[in-house]
Image (tube, grey):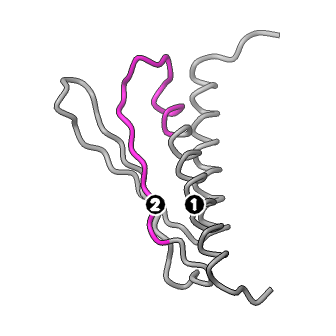
Amino acid sequence: MPRKSKTDQDAGFMRSFWDEVREMQVDYGVVVGVYVHPSNRTGVFVFRLIGAQAASHSVAPIGTQAMQFEYPTGDLLSLPGALWRGSMKLHEMCVEAHKIAASQVELPF
Protein backbone atom coordinates (compact mmCIF):
# COMPACT_ATOMS: atom_id res chain seq x y z
CA MET A 1 0.00 0.00 0.00
CA PRO A 2 1.47 3.40 -0.91
CA ARG A 3 2.37 5.86 1.81
CA LYS A 4 0.02 8.78 2.44
CA SER A 5 1.03 11.99 0.73
CA LYS A 6 2.02 15.02 2.79
CA THR A 7 -1.22 16.71 1.76
CA ASP A 8 -3.31 13.75 2.95
CA GLN A 9 -1.37 13.64 6.21
CA ASP A 10 -1.91 17.37 6.84
CA ALA A 11 -5.61 17.02 6.01
CA GLY A 12 -5.80 14.24 8.58
CA PHE A 13 -4.07 16.41 11.19
CA MET A 14 -6.53 19.26 10.52
CA ARG A 15 -9.47 16.88 10.86
CA SER A 16 -8.05 15.57 14.14
CA PHE A 17 -7.58 19.16 15.34
CA TRP A 18 -11.21 19.89 14.44
CA ASP A 19 -12.33 16.72 16.28
CA GLU A 20 -10.48 17.74 19.46
CA VAL A 21 -11.96 21.25 19.39
CA ARG A 22 -15.45 19.91 18.75
CA GLU A 23 -15.16 17.38 21.57
CA MET A 24 -14.14 20.12 24.04
CA GLN A 25 -17.09 22.19 22.85
CA VAL A 26 -19.60 19.37 23.29
CA ASP A 27 -18.26 17.86 26.53
CA TYR A 28 -17.31 21.00 28.46
CA GLY A 29 -18.99 23.92 26.68
CA VAL A 30 -15.56 25.31 25.79
CA VAL A 31 -15.05 27.79 23.01
CA VAL A 32 -11.54 27.51 21.58
CA GLY A 33 -9.65 30.48 20.21
CA VAL A 34 -6.33 30.36 18.39
CA TYR A 35 -4.12 33.42 18.56
CA VAL A 36 -0.90 33.89 16.61
CA HIS A 37 1.82 36.48 16.89
CA PRO A 38 5.43 36.65 15.77
CA SER A 39 8.05 35.83 18.37
CA ASN A 40 11.30 37.72 18.81
CA ARG A 41 13.04 35.03 16.77
CA THR A 42 12.97 35.63 13.02
CA GLY A 43 10.54 33.35 11.21
CA VAL A 44 9.07 31.86 14.40
CA PHE A 45 5.48 32.36 15.53
CA VAL A 46 3.83 31.84 18.90
CA PHE A 47 0.49 30.02 18.80
CA ARG A 48 -1.77 30.31 21.85
CA LEU A 49 -4.81 28.08 22.20
CA ILE A 50 -7.36 29.28 24.73
CA GLY A 51 -10.39 27.32 25.87
CA ALA A 52 -13.01 29.44 27.64
CA GLN A 53 -16.11 27.83 29.07
CA ALA A 54 -19.44 29.39 28.17
CA ALA A 55 -21.39 30.66 31.17
CA SER A 56 -24.39 28.45 30.35
CA HIS A 57 -22.28 25.31 30.90
CA SER A 58 -21.38 25.97 34.51
CA VAL A 59 -22.51 22.94 36.56
CA ALA A 60 -18.81 22.31 37.23
CA PRO A 61 -17.09 25.46 35.95
CA ILE A 62 -13.59 24.94 34.59
CA GLY A 63 -12.83 28.57 33.83
CA THR A 64 -10.34 29.35 31.10
CA GLN A 65 -7.50 27.05 30.08
CA ALA A 66 -4.62 28.03 27.80
CA MET A 67 -1.50 26.57 26.27
CA GLN A 68 0.99 27.92 23.79
CA PHE A 69 3.75 26.70 21.53
CA GLU A 70 6.20 28.09 19.02
CA TYR A 71 6.32 27.05 15.39
CA PRO A 72 8.48 26.03 13.67
CA THR A 73 10.71 24.16 16.09
CA GLY A 74 13.28 21.44 15.67
CA ASP A 75 10.48 18.86 15.43
CA LEU A 76 9.70 17.50 12.00
CA LEU A 77 6.02 18.28 12.49
CA SER A 78 3.86 20.27 10.10
CA LEU A 79 1.75 23.18 11.33
CA PRO A 80 -1.48 21.13 11.20
CA GLY A 81 0.26 18.44 13.26
CA ALA A 82 1.44 21.02 15.79
CA LEU A 83 -2.09 22.44 16.09
CA TRP A 84 -3.47 18.95 16.70
CA ARG A 85 -0.82 18.23 19.34
CA GLY A 86 -1.60 21.57 21.01
CA SER A 87 -5.33 20.86 21.00
CA MET A 88 -4.74 17.48 22.65
CA LYS A 89 -2.81 19.20 25.44
CA LEU A 90 -5.56 21.81 25.85
CA HIS A 91 -8.16 19.03 25.97
CA GLU A 92 -6.18 17.26 28.72
CA MET A 93 -6.12 20.52 30.66
CA CYS A 94 -9.91 20.84 30.32
CA VAL A 95 -10.40 17.26 31.51
CA GLU A 96 -8.21 17.87 34.58
CA ALA A 97 -9.94 21.17 35.37
CA HIS A 98 -13.32 19.44 35.09
CA LYS A 99 -12.22 16.68 37.48
CA ILE A 100 -11.11 19.29 40.03
CA ALA A 101 -14.30 21.34 39.62
CA ALA A 102 -16.53 18.27 39.83
CA SER A 103 -14.83 17.16 43.04
CA GLN A 104 -15.60 20.54 44.63
CA VAL A 105 -19.25 20.73 43.53
CA GLU A 106 -22.04 18.29 44.28
CA LEU A 107 -23.37 17.28 40.89
CA PRO A 108 -27.09 16.45 40.60
CA PHE A 109 -26.36 13.06 39.01
- Amino acid type, residue under disc 2 in the picture: Gln
Q: Is residue 45 above or below residue 53?
A: above
Residue 62 is situated, as x and y percent measured from the top left of the image, at: 53, 71
Residue 26 sits in quarter: bottom right
Q: Is residue 33 inside the magenta stretch?
A: no
The 10 Å Cα crowd at callout 1, few under 14, some 14 to 19, many 20 or more, is many
30 relative position to 28: left or right? left
Q: Is residue 48 above or below residue 42?
A: below
Q: Which mark is residue 65?
A: 2
Q: Is residue 105 above or below residue 102?
A: below
Residue 43 is situated, as x and y percent measured from the top left of the image, at: 24, 24
The region drawn magenta spans 63-83
Q: Which mark is residue 47?
A: none
The residue at 36%/29% (across/down) is: 71
In depth, the one of 45 and 94 nearer the eye is: 94
Q: Secondary structure at mark 2?
A: strand
Q: Single out the residue that lies furthest toward the top.
A: 2
Of the 4 image quadrants, the one containing the C terminus is bottom right
109 relative position to 45: left or right? right
In depth, the one of 18 and 59 nearer the eye is: 59
Q: Secondary structure at mark 1?
A: helix
Of the 4 image quadrants, the one containing the N terminus is top right
45 relative position to 5: left or right? left
| Residue holding disc 1 | 94
Q: Are marks 2 and 1 in contact (CB under 8 Å)?
A: yes
